[in-house]
Image (cartoon, rainbow, N blue to C red):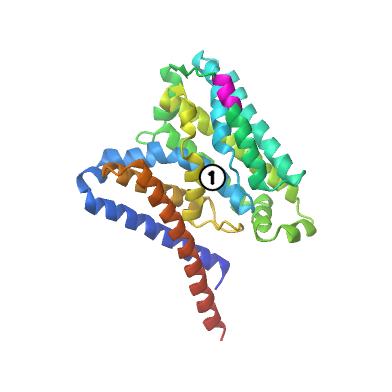
Amino acid sequence: MSVKKKNQIDLLSRFLILAVVCVGFALLRPEAFLSVDNITQVVFQQTPFTILMAFGMSLAIISGGIDISMSSTMVLSSYLSASYFQQGNYFMGLVVAFGVGLGFGLFNGVLISKVKIEPFIATFSVDFMALGLAYVVCNGEYVYGFSDGFRSIVNGYLIPGIPNVALVTFLVFAVLYFLTRRTIYGRTLYSLGHNKKATKLSGMHSDGVILGVYVTNGLLAALTGILYLARLNAADPSIRGTLTNDSIASALIGGIAFCGGTGSVVNTVIGSMIIMFIRNGMNIMGVSTNWQQAVVGFVILFAIVYERVLNNLMAKYAGKGNK
């Protein structure tokens, strides 16, 4: 069985999992779960934030790494840029936010590609640095009260029926899909996940690709931070929440193997949808947040076991086909 065929079957199976989750909650709480307001709120207002962060996590995992620092970079970039956005100086706000994201992304990329520190250790350390700096900057004070014009980047509608935050997420998806599927950069990215040593020996610019992954993650974190400012109308450290765990979960549940080299941003979108609909359904049913965390952990474990079983079945099928 070809890799392309295997990926198609795996992706379809993730759609099936999403369908099972939605049907299950629809049967349990049809009047609340199936309401137009609820579905549109989850798909167009809540999930985009998780998807944007999960895009970065997925790129890191596909390359054979991981990025623990994205959510803290998001918090710091949003705090440092918040006062500019509040004053209506959008240009400086964008420069500061994306400058912070770019800086921390470069820092991660250099630590991993040049200093040769393991991705988990490098980004875990940077996560503490960024979050600590964010608390130093905020000093217990919140920046709040943004203009309606600024808040419209999330709540406004350039296209009728589709909130701007969903439109931004789709544009990011389109760019990343093209980069990962239609360019040399993308081929090198997957090759790194399969075999780093062979990729470097083949002459591919592996260090540049790794650097690009973490720079992209920093920029995605900054973008998500700006969008959160507009949504919450405040700079708040608590926006970090469970985003790191949810972005990892979205990638794994979507079918991106933790060992790297497989999956796509399409898998990321599906995994994020599964996570958010599970959380939404449990909220509707009044399940406590503690149990929600436990359920998400179970779903991650199920997704990993499911992937292993699926791979074994496909390998067995391929073996019979070659006889």
Could you tell me which residue is drawn at 33 percent across and 40 percent down? 40
The C terminus is located in which quarter?
bottom right
The N terminus is located in which quarter?
bottom right
Residue 147: horizontal and vertical position, in percent? 43, 16
Name which quarter of the figure residue 259 lies in: bottom right
Residue 165: in magenta span: no
Could you tell me which residue is drawn at 65 percent across and 38 percent down? 125
Secondary structure under tag 1 reads helix
Residue 260: horizontal and vertical position, in percent? 61, 57
In the rendered image, the vertical position of residue 183 relative to residue 91, given as above or below: below
Asked whether 116 or 262 is in front, the reply is 116
Note whether residue 156 is visible.
no
Residue 233: horizontal and vertical position, in percent? 42, 22
Residue 213: horizontal and vertical position, in percent? 65, 44
**Residue at the left extreme, as displayed:** 31
In the rendered image, the vertical position of residue 243 relative to residue 145, given as above or below: below
Q: Magenta stretch: give its range.
A: 133-138
**Residue at the top extreme, as displayed:** 87
The residue carrying mark 1 is: 55
